[in-house]
Structures are given as C-alpha cells and as structure tokens.
Amino acid sequence: MEITLKERDNKGQAMAKTGEKKAGVMTYSIANDDFIIIDHTEVEPKFKGKGIGKKMLYEIVEMARPKDLKILPLCPFANAMFKKSEDIQDVLKK
C-alpha cells in the first residue's frame, strides 16, 4: 500500500494505491496558513474494511504536524476518526 500526498492551488489529496490500482482518496482544502479542511473520503469497494481511510488520514496528520497546521474534519469519516482516536487530537481544530 502506497499513500501519496499532492497539493495544487488550495486543494490537496491523499491517494492510496496498491500497485497500479487506486484503493482510496481523501481530499482537503487549504483554508489558510493555519488549518486545512478534510472534506471527502472515498475507498474503493473491494478495499473497504482494510483501514485504508485511517491510513490516508494519518498520512495527512503526519504532514500537518511539522507545519503546525490544524485540521477541521468536515468529512463524516474523518470526523468520526478524530472523535475516537486520541493520538491525533493534537491537530484537531476546535
């Protein structure tokens, strides 16, 4: 499983791939220099239940920490993950 982050203009995404097959994508908007907004998570049906969404979220969290960015999780999946995962609360925008 490979997860890559890409940013362009004020948008970004984490894309999960296995080989050449797309497993999932999580998108975010760069609101300003202080925080980003995770707005969508999509996992391909055959990869559901394998932790792909969580891996993409944690990749974004690891990108945000050294930049001192906070994350506003508007996506229902990301929001639920923040509520149940204490180890990423440090980047949650309150």
Image (tube, rainbow, N blue to C red):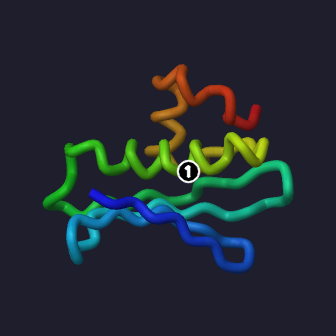
Q: Give the structural element (helix, strand or loop) at label 1.
A: helix
x%, y% of residue 37?
67, 54
x%, y% of residue 3?
39, 60
Point 46% across, 24% down: residue: 84
Residue pointed to by mark 1? 60
Q: Quadrant of residue 77?
A: top left
The quadrant of the picture occupied by the C terminus is: top right
Point 68% across, 28% down: residue: 90
Query: Tag 1: Cα neighbours inside 10 Å, few (<14), some, or many (≥20)?
Result: many
x%, y% of residue 57?
48, 47
**Pick the front one: 5 or 49:** 5
* Residue farthest to the right, as pictured: 33
x%, y% of residue 32?
84, 59
Could you tell whether 61 is left or right of 46 in the image? right
Could you tell whether 17 is left or right of 93 in the image? left
**Pick the front one: 19 or 49:** 19
Q: Quadrant of residue 68?
A: top right
Point 23% across, 77% down: residue: 20
Residue type (three-letter) at the residue carrying disc 1:
Ile
Point 57% across, 30% down: residue: 88
The total of numbered circles placed on residues is 1
* Residue farthest to the top, as pictured: 86
In the rendered view, would you say 18 is above or below 48? Answer: below
Could you tell whether 68 is left or right of 45 in the image? right
In the rendered view, would you say 93 is above or below 53? Answer: above
The quadrant of the picture occupied by the N terminus is: bottom left
